[in-house]
Image: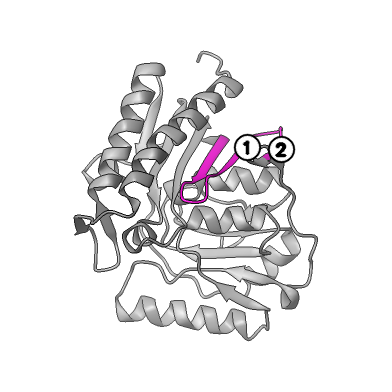
Amino acid sequence: MAAVNLEEILTFGTGLARTVGSVILDAFKQPKNIQHKMGCADLVTETDQQVEEMIIKAIKETYPSHKFIGEESVAGGLKCNLTDDPTWIVDPIDGTTNFVHRYPYVAVCLGFCVNKTVKLGIVYNVPNDEMFTAIRGQGAFSNGKKLAVSSESDLSKSLIMAEFGSARDPATVETVLKNMSSVVLNPVHSIHCMGSAALNICAVASAQAEAYYEFGIHCWDYCAASIILEEAGGVTIDTEGGPMDLMARRIVAACNLTIAEGLRKKLVPIHFPRD
């Protein structure tokens, strides 16, 4: 396998994120043609599809040997198959519901893996023009400013990020609410929902929150942000313990392992099919 130049890939990726970000920003305040994928809360727009097509086209032209996994491509029938080959994991718009409702937390997410390991992450918060980046071993940054996680180690003094998710079957919703109740009664300072998995994780990386958890998300939701958090000094673990599993559709992301484990033990697992 040919060596990859991560600095070169970062420059390409951030430029690409800004290019497609301008398309998202133009569409942000316009009427949208909304479709539903798996349910009433699982939304997709023409812009999601247009932006992913632009991203994949640019990757194929610049790095023809690279593979990719894209949210809309998988929704269209392509397999979610992570191999050892250099692979981009793409979410064209993380926070589509926010995008539809003009809530300004909408991100382009570009993760880059080699040997099934996340090597690089880009999360571009388009409406706020905030570019989060990380290369493994080189730190994490927001618009060029180095990031560092919170030093808090007491879960009861923590701000937790979480989401309701897009599943609306009664059993899943009941467990989601039980988990939120369990966490908030720990107690914690609060639970916030930003509406974007990637930006929730970046909030932890930025010391704006201490932890985030979710079940039912996909690899494209947390791949890029996970390395940003890790490079800011945080941790990502599986909700059932051990290292984060990129294909398991679940994560606890925190400023440190003490907070991560304390939060994990408050959660009832919700099982979704693997990516």
To which quarter of the image does residue 34 belong? bottom left
Q: Is residue 40 found left or right of 113 in the rendered image?
A: left
Q: Residue at x 52, y 51 (%)?
A: 128
Residue receiving disc 1: 134
Q: Residue at x 63, y 86 (%)?
A: 185
- Check disc 1: other Cα within 10 Å, few if <14, some if 14-19, many if 20+: many
Q: Is residue 83 visible?
A: no
Say if the magenta span includes residue 98: no
Foreground of the two, 241 or 250? 250
Give percent across and percent down for residue 16.
44, 30
Query: Regarding mark 2 in the picture, which secondary structure is present there?
Result: loop
Do residues under tags 1 and 2 come within 8 Å of each other at their CB atoms? yes
Give percent across and percent down for residue 133.
60, 38
Does residue 3 lie above or below 99 as drawn? above
Q: How is the image coloured?
A: one colour
Q: Is residue 172 visible?
A: yes
Q: Residue at x 29, y 76 (%)?
A: 169
Region in magenta = 120-140
To which quarter of the image does residue 5 belong? top right
Residue receiving disc 2: 139
Q: Is residue 149 found left or right of 110 in the rendered image?
A: right
Q: Please name the predominant secondary structure of the magenta segment in the image.
A: strand
